[in-house]
Amino acid sequence: MALEARFFLAAVFAVAATCLCLSAVASAFAVPSVAFDEGYSPLFGDDNLVRSSDDKSVRLLLDRRSGSGFISSDYYLHGFFSASIKLPKAYTAGVVVAFYQVAYQPHALVAQGRQQGEPHGLFGLSSPKRLRRLHPRINVPLSCHAHSTVSHQFNHH
């Protein structure tokens, strides 16, 4: 039996009072992309979801009170998703950016904020219930970190 999945990306905010921008684009990888309205719907925080002029990428903004997120409009057997993540330089403890493919074996990328002087955490899902650190000391605020995933048909027995 083939398992279809939906994708969603969310940025949530707990403590810090800064902004985070995230864009989801496929153009950097030379694969076709669809307009946001054709493939995705806002999940929460509509006012904090800023679309590009060509409607092919979005930025998720965070403030003191809310974050934002979106979800694929349909279920897919396979697909490609790419996100560039850049966290603010300041105190960002409590900032979590997560990408999930909702399926029995989900993909997950979690970028976690930090306290002053501590490294940012960038984690990936190594098993259905366990995150592992991808980079021991990544400097997320100084450069964008690109994460891409290709999903394929899962067979569930």
Image (cartoon, rainbow, N blue to C red):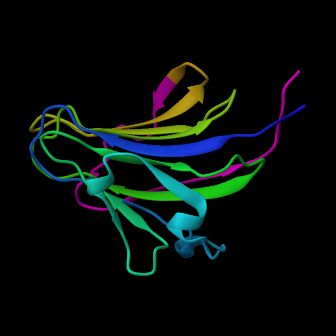
Q: Is residue 17 above or below residue 150?
A: above
Residue range (magenta) = 131-157
| Position of the N terminus by quadrant | top right
**Residue 121 percent coordinates (x, y):** 32, 36
**Residue 78 percent coordinates (x, y):** 75, 51
Closest to the observer: 11 or 82? 11
Closest to the observer: 150 or 65? 65
Specify whether residue 140 is painted magenta. yes
Closest to the observer: 105 or 6? 6
> In the rendered image, which quarter is residue 43 located in?
top left
The extreme bottom residue here reads: 54
**Residue 47 percent coordinates (x, y):** 26, 55
- The residue depicted at 58 percent of the width and 56 percent of the height is 81
Q: Is residue 141 above or below residue 156?
A: below
Count all numbered tags in the image, as a single digit.
0
**Residue 87 percent coordinates (x, y):** 25, 51
- The residue depicted at 40 percent of the width and 64 percent of the height is 58
* Left or right: 62 as drawn, with respect to 25: left
- The residue depicted at 19 percent of the width and 36 percent of the height is 114
* Left or right: 76 as drawn, with respect to 54: right
> In the rendered image, which quarter is residue 15 located in?
top left
* Left or right: 17 as drawn, with respect to 136: left
| Position of the C terminus by quadrant | top right
Q: Is residue 118 above or below residue 29?
A: above
Q: Is residue 75 above or below residue 28?
A: above
Specify whether residue 60 is painted magenta. no
